[in-house]
């Protein structure tokens, strides 16, 4: 019978919390495959999925590959863990490559033959049936693994497919992703979700300075992220009034800094209202003027009770783009619609803002009422995988 073998990664580091992590991971796997019939089995160190429609195997694999906390999977043949049954199956193997080795692992130590001896025996059988093929223990083209588990089943496979790694979605709580239409923030959302954080998202638009298409683009990005994070509650807020007020009352080189500080204040309110525990941005050190150390200090300075996570902080743009391509957001991100931050853009944004100067510029605004007015414009879009 065909089976999919699932291996999990870092969970073993978690000591007493391991059971909680595992139960989240198992329910995430089952949830991801909710549209399919299959049997789920847990054996020490592995999950096994079997009894599924073989014609759907590829689809199942694609879904499983988006589950955080899984390290790798293998498509395997499941046989009863007896010497004869394993030999039966191994005798039927026809190799296409020129060299191979056999690796036997026994989680079940009561299996009557030692791993090395059994591997040797099975190797001889494969050689007999594939006389043109050589054994190569050091650099084989094909490695045939025979994994004998405690459930008295053996799994025979020749490929290990890498998965996402990370920690089970939800095991770290839930945070708020500041989602622009750019390349970086969807990547930031993906990276932080991979460490176990579920996400809601917050987008600011500046309609009518920004278009409906710009907003749709962000909805599309959030929808794509749902492949990994299952569902996103997207908060959409109008930033137009705030920007107009800053434009009229504040020095232009401080415009972006003040905008960001107000975005953060609003984000904090959304966190409070929705029981979210962190703010996530796509900032990367040195990428633009608002992403210097000093800028991040004054922008983050308005946030009191939440950590600000910046998963892209130390990444080069090229590496961020690689991830964006891998998760399928890049082509949407580069669509040429205006972001709210490009409206009234100053020529020379300050690179090293100070708290004192920010506070002076903000004294020309009624921050509380701008924040509250912006919150009144909130619209919610629910997205689901
Ligand atoms: P990105 O590619 O993510 O848009 P960027 O390189 O354009 O990033 P900035 O425009 O300086 O950088 O934005 C920095 C971060 O601030 C973004 O990664 C995002 O987290 C947040 N942000 C910017 N604009 C918006 C917006 N309109 N709505 C919500 N968050 C925003
Ligand atoms: Mg941007």
Image (cartoon, rainbow, N blue to C red):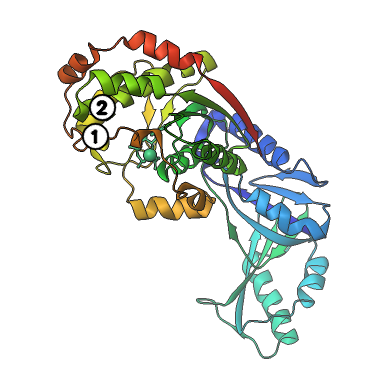
Tell me, for residue 255, which label it has, or none.
2
The crowding category of the residue bearing disc 2, from other C-alpha atoms within 10 Å (few below 14, some 14 to 19, many at least 20), is: many
Identify the residue shown where x is 42% and y is 26%.
279
Where in the image, quadrant-wise, is ligand 1 located?
top left
Coordinates of residue 27 in the picture (x, y in percent): 69, 35
Q: For the residue labelled by badge 1, is the local secondary structure a helix, a strand or a loop? A: loop
Q: Say which of 193 and 107 sits in front.
A: 193
Q: For the residue labelled by badge 2, is the local secondary structure a helix, a strand or a loop? A: helix
Q: Which residue is mark 1?
A: 346
Mark 1 touches mark 2? (CB < 8 Å): yes
State yes or no: Cβ of the residue under disc 1 lies below 8 Å from any atom of ligand 1.
no
Coordinates of residue 82 in the picture (x, y in percent): 80, 62
Residue 247: image quadrant is top left
Identify the residue shown where x is 78% and y is 67%.
86
One can see residue 108 in this view: no
Tell me, for residue 185, which label it has, or none.
none
Identify the residue shown where x is 65% and y is 75%.
120
For marks 1 and 2 on the same chain, the one whose residue lies earlier in the sequence: 2
């Amino acid at each position: 019978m065909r089976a999919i073998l699932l291996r999990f990664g870092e969970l073993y580091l978690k000591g007493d919390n391991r059971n909680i992590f595992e139960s989240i991971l198992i329910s995430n796997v089952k949830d991801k495959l909710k549209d399919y019939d299959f049997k789920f089995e847990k054996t020490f160190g592995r999950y096994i999925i079997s009894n599924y429609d073989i014609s759907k195997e590829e689809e199942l694999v694609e879904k499983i590959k988006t589950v955080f906390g899984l390290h790798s999977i293998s498509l395997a043949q499941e046989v009863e863990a007896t010497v004869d049954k394993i030999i039966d199956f191994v005798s039927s193997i026809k190799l296409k490559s020129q060299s191979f080795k056999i690796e036997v692992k026994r989680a079940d130590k009561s299996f009557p033959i030692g791993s090395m001896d059994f591997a040797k025996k099975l190797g001889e059988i494969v050689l007999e049936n594939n006389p043109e093929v050589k054994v190569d223990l050091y650099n084989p083209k094909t490695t045939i693994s025979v994994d004998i588990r405690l459930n008295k089943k053996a799994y025979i496979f020749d490929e290990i497919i890498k998965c996402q790694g990370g920690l089970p979605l939800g095991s770290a709580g839930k945070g708020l992703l500041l989602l622009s239409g750019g390349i970086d923030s969807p990547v930031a959302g993906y990276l932080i979700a991979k460490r176990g954080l579920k996400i809601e998202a917050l987008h600011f638009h500046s309609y009518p300075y920004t278009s409906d298409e710009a907003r749709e683009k962000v909805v599309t990005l959030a929808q794509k992220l749902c492949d990994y994070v299952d569902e996103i509650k997207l908060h959409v807020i109008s930033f137009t009034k705030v920007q107009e007020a800053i434009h009229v009352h504040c020095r232009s080189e401080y415009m972006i800094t003040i905008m960001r500080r107000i975005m953060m204040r609003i984000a904090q309110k959304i966190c409070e209202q929705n029981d979210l525990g962190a703010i996530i941005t796509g900032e990367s050190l040195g990428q633009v003027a608002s992403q210097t150390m000093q800028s991040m200090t004054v922008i983050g300075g308005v946030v009191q009770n939440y950590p600000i996570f910046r998963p892209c902080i130390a990444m080069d743009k090229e590496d961020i783009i690689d991830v964006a391509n891998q998760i399928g957001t890049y082509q949407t991100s580069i669509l040429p619609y205006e972001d709210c931050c490009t409206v009234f853009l100053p020529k020379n944004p300050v690179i090293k803002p100070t708290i004192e100067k920010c506070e002076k510029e903000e004294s020309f605004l009624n921050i509380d009422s701008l924040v509250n007015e912006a919150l009144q414009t909130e619209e919610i879009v629910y997205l689901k995988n």
